[in-house]
Image (cartoon, grey):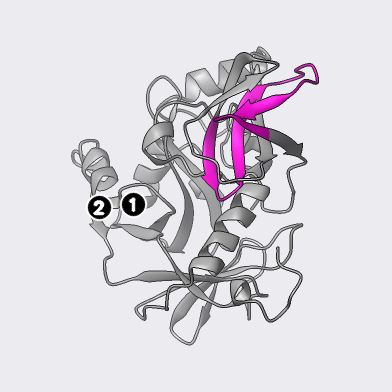
């Protein structure tokens, strides 16, 4: 993060996040049955990290799930195609009483600044916008969702994305959708999936991996001296050992073997330095 407190990286900037709304009598029951975290644990105004898996336990979408009220949920999608996800989920609605709607009227904005009212996983209504506390050990951050559109700051958006990666929140993009299990993405650090709530798509794989100790890979935060590209192969002492899941400038998240021997890492001919992941973003 920049040392200059007046840097434009600290200003509010529009974010690419989209809102997919689930609304109706069965919205909570549907989300509980389809997503990987315990939606019923949320009270009105609370949110959690959550996701949707395929039957093989691979993450198709990762999002913040916000309970507006007993019949309304918002899925805040950092990089997933909201329309495509709505169409995929619609196939499982069947006789459930709910409607899925991409809220094109809502826009997200973020700033590396303390929330005005939101704290932890409790959202707040601030002047007609919904505010979320996205802060962690790397410093305070606030995200607001409303009908107004914030200006775009390239520097501030990059700083926001790098803060996400530094705290272990991956962007899957086209190269990572359906590729990784929650454990390979170290999503237990964000408390983004449940082992106790019961069945959901991919739950058997998630539970087996946890209870049999079969997680062999996890996230590592890497940096280089030049921009990195998501999807690039990571090599350790010349041998392929992993892949970059997400990249923002010269910072990236890689899925690498756990307990690997120390060795020279590189991706795209760029030497990589491993940095410790920051905590504090779990909700």
Q: Is residue 73 visible?
A: no
Q: Residue furthest bottom?
A: 127
Residue visible at 60% across and 41% down in the picture: 252
Q: Which residues are magenta?
A: 244-271
56 up-or-down from 87: above or below: above
Q: Position of residue 256 (x, y in %)?
A: 64, 24
Q: Position of residue 165 (x, y in %)?
A: 61, 48
- Mark 1 or 2, nearer chain start: 1
Residue neighbourhood size for the residue with mark 2, other residues' Cα within 10 Å, grouped as few (<14), some (14–19), many (≥20): many
Q: Is residue 91 left or right of residue 179?
A: left
The secondary structure that dominates the magenta segment is strand
Q: Position of residue 66 (x, y in %)?
A: 47, 59
Per the image, the residue denoted by label 2 is 98
Residue visible at 65% across and 16% down in the picture: 216
The secondary element bearing badge 1 is classed as helix
Picture disc at residue 258: none
Pointer 1 with pointer 2, Cβ within 8 A: yes
63 up-or-down from 53: above or below: below
Q: Is residue 215 left or right of residue 182?
A: right
Per the image, the residue denoted by label 1 is 27
Q: Is residue 106 visible?
A: yes
Q: Is residue 168 left or right of residue 200?
A: right
Residue visible at 41% across and 19% down in the picture: 56
Q: Quadrant of the N terminus?
A: bottom right
Q: Position of residue 40 (x, y in %)?
A: 50, 48
């Amino acid at each position: 993060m920049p040392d200059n407190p007046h840097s434009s990286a600290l200003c509010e900037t529009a974010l690419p996040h989209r809102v997919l709304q689930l609304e109706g009598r069965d919205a909570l029951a549907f989300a509980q049955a389809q997503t990987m975290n315990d939606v019923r644990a949320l009270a009105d105004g609370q949110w959690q990290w959550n996701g949707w898996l395929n039957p093989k336990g691979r993450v198709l979408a990762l999002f913040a799930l916000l309970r507006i009220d007993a019949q309304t949920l918002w899925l805040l999608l950092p990089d997933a195609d909201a329309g495509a996800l709505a169409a995929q989920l619609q196939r499982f609605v069947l006789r459930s009483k709910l409607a899925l709607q991409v809220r094109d009227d809502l826009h997200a904005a973020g700033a590396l600044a303390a929330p005005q009212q939101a704290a932890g996983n409790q959202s707040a209504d601030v002047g007609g916008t919904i505010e979320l506390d996205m802060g962690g050990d790397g410093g305070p951050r606030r995200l607001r969702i409303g009908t107004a559109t914030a200006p775009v700051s390239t520097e501030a958006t990059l700083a926001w994305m790098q803060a996400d990666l530094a705290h272990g929140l991956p962007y899957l993009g086209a190269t990572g959708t359906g590729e990784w299990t929650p454990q390979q993405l170290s999503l237990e650090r964000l408390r983004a999936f449940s082992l106790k709530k019961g069945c959901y798509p991919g739950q058997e794989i998630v539970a087996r991996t946890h209870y049999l100790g079969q997680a062999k890979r996890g996230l590592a935060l890497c940096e280089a001296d030049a921009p990195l590209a998501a999807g690039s192969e990571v090599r350790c002492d010349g041998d392929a050992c992993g892949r970059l899941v997400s990249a923002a400038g010269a910072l990236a998240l890689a899925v690498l073997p756990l307990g690997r021997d120390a060795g020279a890492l590189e991706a795209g001919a760029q030497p990589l330095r491993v940095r410790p992941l920051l905590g504090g973003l779990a909700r």
